[in-house]
Every structure is written in structure tokens, then in C-alpha cells.
Amino acid sequence: MIFNLNGQNIFLIIFLILIASAIVMVIDILRILKKERKKLFLSKDFAKNELFLRISEDFKKQLEESIAREIQKNIEEFKDKLQKTSEEIVRNYRNWFEGGDQKIQKIISQFSQQLSQEMEKIKEEMAQLTKFSLKNQTYLSEIASEKISELNQALKGELSKIQQSSLKISEELSKELSQKFEKIYQSARETLNKKVMEVEKKIENYKKERFKEMDQKIYQMLEKVAKKTIGKAIDLSTHEKLVMEALEKAKREIF
Amino acid sequence: MEKSFAELIKNIKTTEELSLVLDEITKKRLKGKKIPSDLEKKLRALPKLRLEIAFSPPESFIKRVSQWLEKELGQKIILDVVVNPKIIGGAVIEFQGKWRDFSLAKEIHHLLSDYPAE
């Protein structure tokens, strides 16, 4: 990565340096204050083991004010020093950068030359690579087409096998189905025939009964008619003759 | 007396005539006339033949039947004649617990009822 030295970056570097020096200053001031406190207050060990000195409120106030004044003075001094050193640093850096900019430019131009050379090399390699890849591509496509044709042939073979097996299966299925259908048809036909025969038998019986009834009725009527007509037609001598015949029959059977 | 009774018995052909004779005997006995004690018994013991016929028979036919029966059976038979036109012709005869139907009605019935069975 190339570090671009423009005005903004320079300012940022200076600002960081200033902040670092300010932090160092603050640490110094805190150290000084700690020393002062040690002088003003009694240590804990002293308070425990030695006599405790009573300090008046006025004295305490005066002491605090003198400390504050001292701190203010120190801060003022620090501010002056900080300003002076920062100005000095900025000046030094500006001089350094003015001299170093030319060096950087030189380095950058060298770097850019190297970069362009490298780019050329990469381009050449890329071209070689593309050539190689084209060759590979044609080779691969040939192999692929061969494999595809092989696969196609294999597929054709498999398809024909599948077709044959499916044909066999369908033939077997159709045979089985036709056999089953035949069985069902036969059983249905048998049951139907049975039913038809039963119904025919019933019809025949019904017919016979009806005819019998009708015959009976007809013959009853005929009987009535015959009895009436014959009874009226028979004369006395015939009646007597018939009775005598009956008596003759009775003689043979019951006398 | 016995002769007249014998003739009387000889002339009895039907149950009606027999009952008339029995009534007469009872009447005479009531009047005090002497009648042989076994006569009524003998009369009542005479065999009877029930003759069912289709026409109302004349006296001559009853006589003819009675004579024929006496001749054929060798004894006096009392006729119980029943007229039933439904039998058309012939006779239904019952004698000593035996019954036979020789009527024309039966013949016709047989003829017509057998016919459909054929």
C-alpha cells in the first residue's frame, strides 16, 4: 500500500504527536501534585504512631490557595512549553517533509515502473494461460463429446432394455389382468346363470301354481255346470238304473 | 195275529214304515192287545241300509230295491232313503258301518279333477 503524504495526513501526524506530549505533561503534573500532598498531609503511619497536629481552618485555606496558585503557575508554564515544542516539532516536520517529498516521489516513480513491468509479465502469463485453457477446452470438449456419445449409446442400450422389460411387464400384466377378468367374468356369469335359473324356476313354479289354480277354478265351474246340466237331463228310469248299478257295485265291495 | 205281523214285517221297506209299525205296536200295547214281546225287538234289530239318491223315488222303485236286497243278502233290509239332488245321479250307500259313494257327482268330480293333473 502506498502512503500518500498530503497536507491532511501531515496534520494528523502532528496532532497525534501533540496529544502524546500533552499526556506526558499531564502525567508529570500529577506526579508533582502527589509529591506536594505527601509534604502537606501526614502519612497514615504517622497518624497512627505519632502525635496528630491540629491545623486551623485559616491555615488550611491559605495552604490550599497557595497550592492552587502553584498548580496554575505550573499549568501556565506547561502551556508555554507545549506551544513552543509543538511549534518546533511542526517546523522540524515541515522541513523534513519538504526535503523527503522528492525522495518519496522518486520511490513512487520507481515503484510504478516496477509495477508496470510486473503488470506486463502478468499479462503475458495470462495470455499464455488463456492459450493453454483454450487448448484444454478443446481437448476437454472432445473428451466430453466422446463421453457424451458413449453415454448416449449406453443410454440407448439401457432404454431398449427398459423398453423390453416394460413390454414384458405390460404383457404379463395384461395376461394376468385378462385371466383375472376371465375369472371374474366366469364367476359373475355363473352367479347370474344361477340367479336366472332360480328366477326361471320360481317363474315356472308360479306359472304352474297359477295354472293349477286356474284349472281348478275352470274345473270347479265345469263341474258345477256339468252337475246342473246332467242332473236336469237325467230321467227317472236312468236314475233308477244308476241306483241299481250303484247297489251292484256295493254288493261287490261292502255287502 | 202272527200271520198279520209277518205280513206287516214283510211289507216294511223303509225306516219311515218301520217307525209307523213301531208306533202302531206301542198304541196296540197301550190298548191292552197282546203283542209278542220280542216282535219290537226283532223289528228294531232288522239291518238298515242308508241309500242317498238324487231323486224322489216312487214306491215301485223302493219295492224293487228292497226285494233285490232281500234276495242278494238273504234277509230283510230296511232302507233309509235320503234324497239329495247334489249327488246328481247314482247313490251313496252305507251299510253296517261301511260307506261308499257311487254318485255321478263324484264321477264328474273325479273326471274333472284328474284331468288337470294329467
Image (spheres, rainbow, N blue to C red):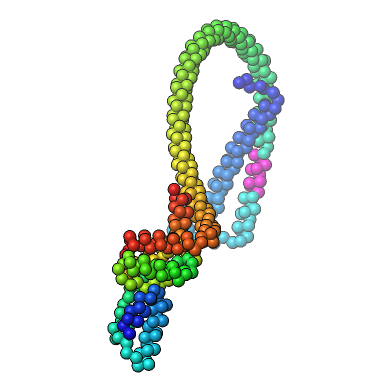
The answer to whether any part of residue A151 appears in the image is no
Residue A224 in magenta stretch? no
In this orientation, which residue lies closer to the viewer: A117 or A59?
Answer: A117
In this orientation, which residue lies closer to the viewer: A68 or A237?
Answer: A237
Magenta segment main secondary structure: helix
Which residue corresponds to the image point at 45% horizontal and 27% vertical from the top-left? A175
In this orientation, which residue lies closer to the viewer: B24 or A195?
Answer: B24
Image vertical order of residue B50 relative to residue A146, above or below: below
* Location of residue A31 (image quadrant): top right
Which residue corresponds to the image point at 33% horizontal and 66% vertical from the top-left? B71
Q: Is residue B89 left or right of residue A62?
A: left
Q: Is residue A5 left or right of residue A155?
A: right
Q: Position of residue B84 (x, y in %)?
A: 47, 68
Residue A71 in magenta stretch? yes
Q: Position of residue A141 (x, y in %)?
A: 54, 10
Which residue corresponds to the image point at 61% horizontal and 21% vertical from the top-left? A1
Q: Which residues are magenta?
A: A69-78
Image vertical order of residue A244 relative to residue A39, above or below: below
In this orientation, which residue lies closer to the viewer: A4 or A198?
Answer: A198
Identify the image quadrant of the C terminus of chain A: bottom left
